[in-house]
Each structure stands twice: as C-alpha cells, then as structure tokens.
Amino acid sequence: MVTDIRKNIAAVREKIAAAAASAGRDPSEVRLMGVTKYHPVEMMAEAAPYLDLIGENKVQEAAEKRGLWPCGAASCPWHLIGHLQRNKVRRALESFDLVESIDAPQTAAAMERLLREKGARRFPVFIEVNMSREAAKHGVAPEEAERLLDNIMKEAPSLSVEGLMTVAADSDDERLLRETFAGLRELRERLRRASGLPLPELSMGMSGDFVTAVEEGSTIVRVGSAIFGPRIYN
C-alpha cells in the first residue's frame, strides 16, 4: 500500500510541476494536501512523509484520528476543509492547525471567544468563498467576502486570515473551472488592496481539477482519490 501511495503522490507532484511550469510559476509555490476523509490512520501515516498538509472534512473524525496519530504533532499540519459548526469550534481548535472554511462572522466570533479564554496565539484561517454560487455548497458569496474579512479583522483579532478557499463545481467544463479559479485569484487581489493583508494562500483544486487550479494560481491543492483511491466508508 505504501508503494502505491508514494507512486500516486509522485504522479500528482509531476502534474503540479508541469502545470506550474506552463504558467511560469515555481512548483515549490504549490503545497500538496492529502484529503483523508474516511481513510484510516494507517494510510494517512504512510502518506504523511510525502505530503505537505493533511486535510480533514469532519471535526469529530479528525479528533479521533489525532488521538491515534503515530507521526508526531509537527509531522504534517492538519487543515479543516469542511464546514465548521459553531458547536464544534472548541474541538476544531484542539484538532487542527488551520481552518480553511470560515464563511460567517458568527463562526469567527465563536473562535475568538475560545481563543481569548485560552490566551492563545493568533490562529490562522482562510475565508471560504462559494465562487460557483451553488446552493448546496458552503462559503460566503464573492461580493460578501470583503465585508466578512473586515468583520474578522475588527471583531476577531485572534484570527489571522491567511488566504481564501473555494470548491469548484463538479464539472468537466474547462472554461467554467478556469473562470472559478481565476475569479478567486482576482478576488484575493481586491481584498489585498482593501485590507492591506498579504493573503498569501489560495486553496483551490482537487483530484479532478488541480492542474487548472495550479495554472490559475493555487498555492494549496486538496487531493484525495488521486492519492488514496476510493474512500473507505464504514
């Protein structure tokens, strides 16, 4: 199994490098996240030395896996990429190194309260933007992103907004995907100018579309099935 995972990661990194080169980018600008939802800790531990990040969708699942994690706390940072419910904020802060899915001021406020209680350092987050405007997807509407960022900066100073995240439509339409990813990159530039923050990260692109995302400026690609194969449902 470890051989297959290593080969899969190597193949993904080759595609990242080719996509970055075609866009005149340095491949080292793009970090590879292994998305591990429903995959066992044993597979995750095999992959971790060859990944830059681990991404989990569910707080409860991640908390249970963290308790079994054999690789050490600093081995590979964990990001929450799924929706964060306010009643799961405390567990999320304990289980993750970064939350990519902030899409409401109420969630930011709940995190702020707990971080202040703990006297914790600034906690890094991304704002999730629903660029495809699909009703079934989470994320703030693009036109509301600046207002949310401003709210976080004023009302939740314990949070450090490091970038933006989006989930593209499940589509083979290259034009649509490119518009989505380019749109997030352009939104990031507008938010930089408005806020003065560097916002270095763009988390966009998954197994089926990460090549296009890299060409359009992604700094983190979230890859699951192309690394681990089909999800293992309990």
Image (tube, rainbow, N blue to C red):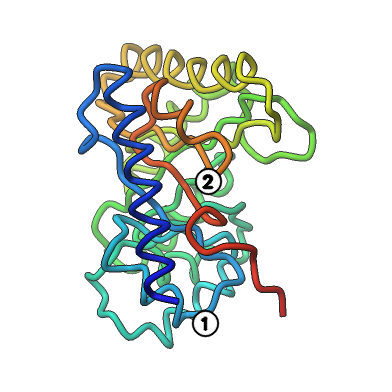
Task: State how many labels appear.
Answer: 2
Q: Position of residue 194 (x, y in %)?
A: 36, 13
- Using residue 107 as the reference point, say whether residue 55 is left or right of it: left
Q: Position of residue 133 (x, y in %)?
A: 71, 25
Quickly name the residue at label 1.
Answer: 64
Residue 222 or residue 140, whichever sits in front: 222
Q: Quadrant of the N terminus?
A: bottom left
Q: Quadrant of residue 130?
A: top right
Q: Which mark is residue 101?
A: 2
Residue at 47% x, 80% y: name it: 41
Q: Is residue 136 above or below residue 218?
A: below
Which residue type carries mark 2? Ser
Which residue type carries mark 1? Glu
Residue 115 or residue 214, whichever sits in front: 214
Q: SS for tag 1?
A: helix
- Using residue 233 as the reference point, say whether residue 82 is left or right of it: left
